[in-house]
Amino acid sequence: GDLNKNVRTIAEVLKGAGYATYMAGKWHVTPHIKPEGPKYNWPRQRGFDRFYGTIHGAGSFFDPNSLTRENTQVSPLTDEGYQPKSGPYYYTDAINDHA
């Protein structure tokens, strides 16, 4: 899907009231998943202050190919911002740990 630019996200609404926002999980409301862009419909560009998750909805739970921290794609194997507490990387555990 592609989130319409005329539709405000909850983050855009809350930002106007002074709230900070964080999105963790699957975004998948933009057809543009490549790290070189365009990124006009990525979470950070749609009002979220921080983001950890995947830009598209499908992928591996062990090595998600569009895993993104803020606006930069990262590898779960080399992500300095997160390593699992025990065992191998698993996407839903990582999302839970970031929530």
Image (tube, rainbow, N blue to C red):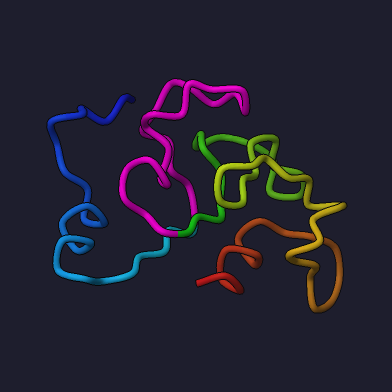
Please state which of residues 7 and 92 is positioned toward the viewer in this rendering: 7
Q: Residue at x 50, y 37 (%)?
A: 57
Identify the residue at the far bottom of this view.
85
Q: Residue at x 73, y 45 (%)?
A: 74
Give the percent coordinates (x, y) of residue 80: 81, 61
Q: In the rendered image of this protein, does residue 34 appear above or below residue 95?
A: above
Q: Residue at x 76, y 49 (%)?
A: 62
* Left or right of residue 11: residue 98: right
The part of the image, by quadrant, that contains residue 52 is bottom right
* Left or right of residue 34: residue 49: left
The part of the image, by quadrant, that contains residue 72 is top right
Q: Residue at x 41, y 59 (%)?
A: 49
Inspect the magenta stretch and tell me whether residue 27 lies in it.
yes
Q: In the rendered image of this protein, does residue 35 appear above or below residue 68?
A: above
Inspect the magenta stretch and tell me whether residue 36 lies in it.
yes
* Left or right of residue 8: residue 37: right
Q: In the rendered image of this protein, does residue 44 appear above or below residue 79?
A: above
Q: In the rendered image of this protein, does residue 97 appear above or below residue 15?
A: below
Please state which of residues 84 and 44 is positioned toward the viewer in this rendering: 44
The part of the image, by quadrant, that contains residue 59 is top right
Give the percent coordinates (x, y) of residue 69: 61, 51
How many numbered marks does the figure carry? 0
Give the percent coordinates (x, y) of residue 6: 13, 31
Give the residues in magenta: 25-49
* Left or right of residue 65: residue 39: left
Give the percent coordinates (x, y) of residue 60: 69, 41
Image quarter where the N terminus lies is: top left
